[in-house]
């Protein structure tokens, strides 16, 4: 009985046990290099600054929620808007009030003044001009467009409702919604307000 074509092919594979030639390996390396040159910049754009900044803002909000609950204290998420309010900076030595286009988490110190959180994950973080914190809408209907906005996070696992409006790259309007009983914020590519 004659072997089938599949059996002949399998026998040839077993007999031809030499591996890859140098030319074949070089061709594979060249193809992988060309693919990385084409895909690399697209991957960088995908993981660009916008995504990093939104992830940072979201994680600070979630960690502020957790820290207030775990340590049984009131934390204040401070949104330092891109436009400072000169009336809020009464004391030139007040570093917290002088910040702009940033977020920080503060607590009340023993002397009744605001101090930065001791938690290293909640340290002050400024954003580039391409990621501008424009306004904060409070649940009361108030819209704040300059200065600092203090959003309390309570030890009872709740926070005050707020919407942070962000201008990205000077043209795109985004909203970050902080919910009263939910630690993860909602990020939308639109300007949202309370109705």
Image (spheres, rainbow, N blue to C red):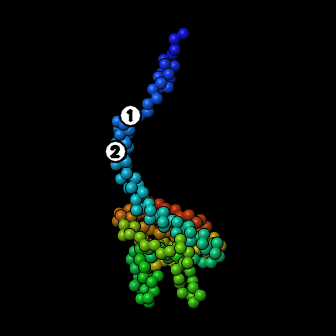
Mark 1 closeness class: few <14, some 14–19, many ≥20 residues within 10 Å:
few
Q: Taking the image as drawn, is residue 142 in sight?
A: no
Above or below, comparing residue 175 to residue 160 in the picture: above
The spot of residue 179 in percent (x, y) is: 56, 67
The spot of residue 48 in percent (x, y) is: 40, 59
Q: Which residue is mark 1?
A: 21
Mark 2 closeness class: few <14, some 14–19, many ≥20 residues within 10 Å:
few
Above or below, comparing residue 177 to residue 105 in the picture: above
The answer to the question of whether label 1 and label 2 lie on touching residues, with beta carbons closer than 8 A, is: no
Above or below, comparing residue 7 to residue 162 in the picture: above
The spot of residue 99 in percent (x, y) is: 43, 79
- Comes first in the chain, label 1 or label 2: 1
The extreme top residue here reads 1
- Residue 165 left/right relative to 114: left
Q: Nearer the viewer, residue 18 or 127?
A: 18
Q: Nearer the viewer, residue 9 or 145?
A: 9
Estimate the spatial distance between the alpha carbons at disc 1 and disc 2, rounded to whole Å: 20 Å
As drawn, the label of residue 34 is 2
Residue at 48% across / 67% down in the picture? 57
- Dot 2 falls on a residue whose secondary structure is helix
Closer to viewer: mark 1 or mark 2: 1
- Residue 69 left/right relative to 116: right
Q: Taking the image as drawn, is residue 103 in sight?
A: yes
Q: Nearer the viewer, residue 135 or 169?
A: 169
């Amino acid at each position: 009985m004659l072997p089938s074509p599949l059996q002949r092919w399998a026998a040839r594979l077993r007999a031809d046990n030499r591996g890859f030639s140098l030319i074949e390996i070089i061709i594979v390396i060249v193809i992988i290099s060309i693919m990385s040159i084409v895909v690399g910049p697209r991957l960088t754009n995908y993981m660009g600054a916008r995504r990093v900044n939104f992830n940072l803002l979201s994680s600070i909000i979630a960690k502020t929620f957790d820290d207030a609950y775990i340590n049984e204290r009131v934390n204040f998420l401070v949104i330092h808007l891109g436009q400072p309010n000169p009336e809020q900076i009464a004391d030139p030595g007040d570093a917290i009030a002088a910040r702009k286009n940033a977020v920080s988490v503060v607590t009340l110190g023993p002397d009744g003044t605001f101090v930065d959180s001791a938690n290293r994950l909640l340290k002050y973080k400024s954003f580039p001009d391409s990621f501008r914190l424009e306004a904060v809408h409070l649940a009361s209907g108030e819209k704040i467009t300059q200065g600092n906005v203090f959003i309390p996070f309570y030890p009872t696992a709740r926070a005050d409702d707020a919407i942070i409006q962000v201008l990205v790259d000077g043209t795109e309007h985004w909203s970050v919604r902080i919910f009263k009983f939910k630690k993860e914020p909602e990020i939308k590519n639109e300007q949202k307000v309370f109705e």
